[in-house]
Image: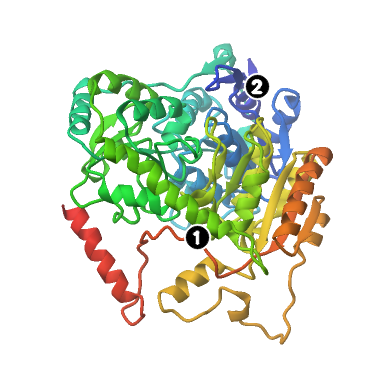
Amino acid sequence: MRLTTAQALVAWLTAQRSRTLDGREVPLFPAVFAIFGHGNVLGLGTALAERSAELPVWRGHTEQGMALAAVGLAKAAQRRQVGVATSSIGPGALNLMTAAGVAHANRLPLLLLPGDTFVGRAPDPVLQQVEHFGDPTVTVNDAFRPVSRYFDRITRPEQLIGTLPQVARVLTDPADSGPVVVALPQDVQAETYDFPDALFEPVVHEPPRPRPDRAALSRAAHALRSARRPLLILGGGVRYSGAGPRAVEMAQRHGIPITETTAGRTLVPHDHPLYAGPLGITGSASANTLAAEADVVLAVGTRLQDFTTASWTVFAPDVRIVSINAARFDAVKHGAVAVVADADAALEDLAPELGVWKAAPEWTARAAVVRGEWDAHIDKLRTPTVGTPTYAQIVGAVNALSDPGDYVMTSSGGMPGELVGGWRAAGGAPSMDVEYGFSCMGYELAGAWGAAMAHDGGLVTTMLGDGSYLMLNSELFSAAFAGHPLVAVVCDNDGYAVIARLQEGQGGSAFNNLYRDCRTTHTDPPRVDFAAHAQALGCAAFTAAGLDEFRDAYARARVAAVELSRPAVVVVRTEPAAWTESGAWWEVGVPEHLSGRAAYDAAKTGQLRHLNG
């Protein structure tokens, strides 16, 4: 089949299919997000236009934003579908870099197709080309290498035949999942080649479910059977494997309290008697209390990052960790008893190994007790008060007004601590995306656009602060123009309030975070009218001055988003100094002359005792 390189690539994209967790066959690549420039408009752009009925193309308004939308799509699709983003060369390509970092840190599939300079070099240097004095083969796209799971530059059309199977492997493999970057020089995009028909035959991708090594499984079972106070941690790998029901059933059979990581949130119904709450810094005091007392921890599908482990101070020094993970890289961390396998397959095979073993009954009962104490604490924080509402009160209102099939999102600032720690889930299908692997400001709006495309169970609500809104808001217009409904709750607390809390809480001076502490030549600096701005971007907009007004505004926004098929934005002033605290420690570098250094040194001692132990 004689095609250009670009035509062959697009034909291959349209032929790839995927199997969802519930068994449906869907396109592996359901959407392409594109901003065209001279580096991709004629080659790839022409090929996409020819197949637009089969492969929907959505116009983005920043390369970073549209690529983040592709990331949000993949997360909402449980990694069973992949968003594609293409840009021109130079600044357009580099603007994709942040999204690659988000996908890499969160182990989410993303296909990036940046344009590149001419392989032939006849017109060098071309517009937007950055010349490397010592290596003429280097372009800005080489900067993607540290944030790519797989990187290639296509310099001959026939190279697609070898590289495309590798692209599919990485995007659909549970252990290797992450961003793939295929750089496309603009002259090669337009070159033709006689491609084999077999390259374009439909393929249905079903992520492999590797079963555990028997010896490793036996060691894990032996460690668990020795426990009186075991704790189960469910991470994102449980979500993507669809292993949530099996994990809960195993916990019930053996009386094991359950906690969740940020990526594993909403896998367990909040009112389940074994649910101890979310773990870590943005989690709950209830889960952290049990973590400190547990003698064996079974960590499933988690890389145990610092917010989950409270910088490795949340566990007892002599705890034994059993780790089930599809990626050996993650499974072996921190001296764990490593089981490399799919989460669902491993839990299925582990069941007969555990026999009739059960945790100590008094330990099993602790889960409901400590979570009840945490629930009472959250209820108190959510209680209506006079004056400016808090984040906890806003989250409580959204939680109460949401339907079981809805999907809630956030990414950065103070909202992850409120949403992870305070949200009460119905359980079942995953219904939360807290991007806290990279904590990318602006993901809240861009990612919500992609999530709105992929999530078909209910309405997407994204929650963010004024700082994230100002960081990246252009994809609100993309979603409005495209006709994708969602609700964005913008909490205006007058700056980067959570970083101000960190700064001042450790003894630093209030500086450059809240607007009142930032340099300006004005005695009365301007403020942003977020509602007017959102309206200018084609969104429905609502404002609220207090908690009662917010409840009413959010309820009306939900209706408007669906009826108008576009985003609805709710703007509410929030208290900048009231936060939900789990009591866990987070390691940040504290200078010796600040007042927070003494507490830092004390916590560091406990951390080292745990790691050395």
Identify the disc placed on residue 161.
none
Whether residue 154 is situated above or below residue 246 in the rendered picture:
below
Q: Amino acid at mark 1?
A: Thr
Residue 570: image x %, image y %?
74, 55
Q: Could you tell me which residue is drawn at 16 percent across and 54 percent down?
A: 612
- Is any atom of residue 66 visible in this view? no
* Residue 276 occupies quadrant: top left
Identify the disc placed on residue 3.
2
Residue 105: image x %, image y %?
45, 46
Between 24 and 415, the one lying in front of the other is 415
For marks 1 and 2, give the CA distance. Answer: 58 Å
Mark 1 or mark 2: whose residue is earlier in sequence: 2
Whether residue 94 is situated above or below residue 268 in the rendered picture:
below
| 545 sits left or right of 340 in the view | right
Whether residue 53 is situated above or below residue 332 in the rendered picture:
above
Secondary structure beneath disc 2? strand
Residue 439: image x %, image y %?
51, 54
Between 381 and 469, the one lying in front of the other is 381
Q: Which residue is mark 1?
A: 580
Binning the other alpha carbons within 10 Å of mark 1 as few (below 14), some (14 to 19) or many (20 upward) gives many
Between 521 and 526, the one lying in front of the other is 526
Secondary structure beneath disc 1? loop
Q: Could you tell me which residue is drawn at 33 percent across and 82 percent down?
A: 593
| 467 sits left or right of 258 in the view | right
* Residue 44 occupies quadrant: top right
Binning the other alpha carbons within 10 Å of mark 2 as few (below 14), some (14 to 19) or many (20 upward) gives some
